[in-house]
Image (cartoon, rainbow, N blue to C red):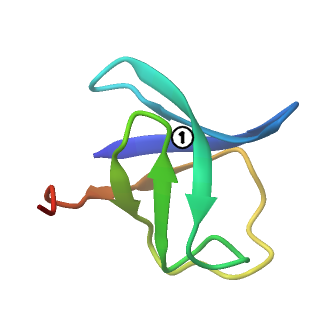
Amino acid sequence: MKAMIRRSGVGLSIYMSKKDVEEPVVAVENEDLWGGFILVRNGWLLGLPDLPQGTRLPITVEAMKQPDQD
């Protein structure tokens, strides 16, 4: 799904227009953000594309929602 990632006053947030949802990012797998997973406050685990470390925000990317793990 298309997602816009931006910096807010308290950290990163992500907006998914298809779901009309904006949530803060609570955890990141990689320090440089790209090519790993992020955990969103609503519990979604999203995979991000592998982009160069200096990529500027805000940016719209194709994020892949991971299936629920039980």
Position of residue 67 measured from the top left corner of the image (x, y, whole percent): 14, 59
Q: Nearer the viewer, residue 22 or 55?
A: 22
Quarter location, residue 58: top right
Q: Is residue 40 above or below residue 66?
A: above
Q: Is residue 30 above or below residue 57?
A: below
The furthest residue to the right: 9
Q: Residue at x 56, y 75 (%)?
A: 29
Position of residue 14 measured from the top left corner of the image (x, y, whole percent): 55, 38
Position of residue 46 measured from the top left corner of the image (x, y, whole percent): 37, 58
Marker count (numbered): 1
Q: Residue at x 27, y 26 (%)?
A: 18
Quarter location, residue 19: top left
**Left or right: 36 as drawn, with respect to 66:** right
- Label 1: which residue? 4
Q: Residue at x 78, y 59 (%)?
A: 56
The kind of residue tagged 1 is: Met
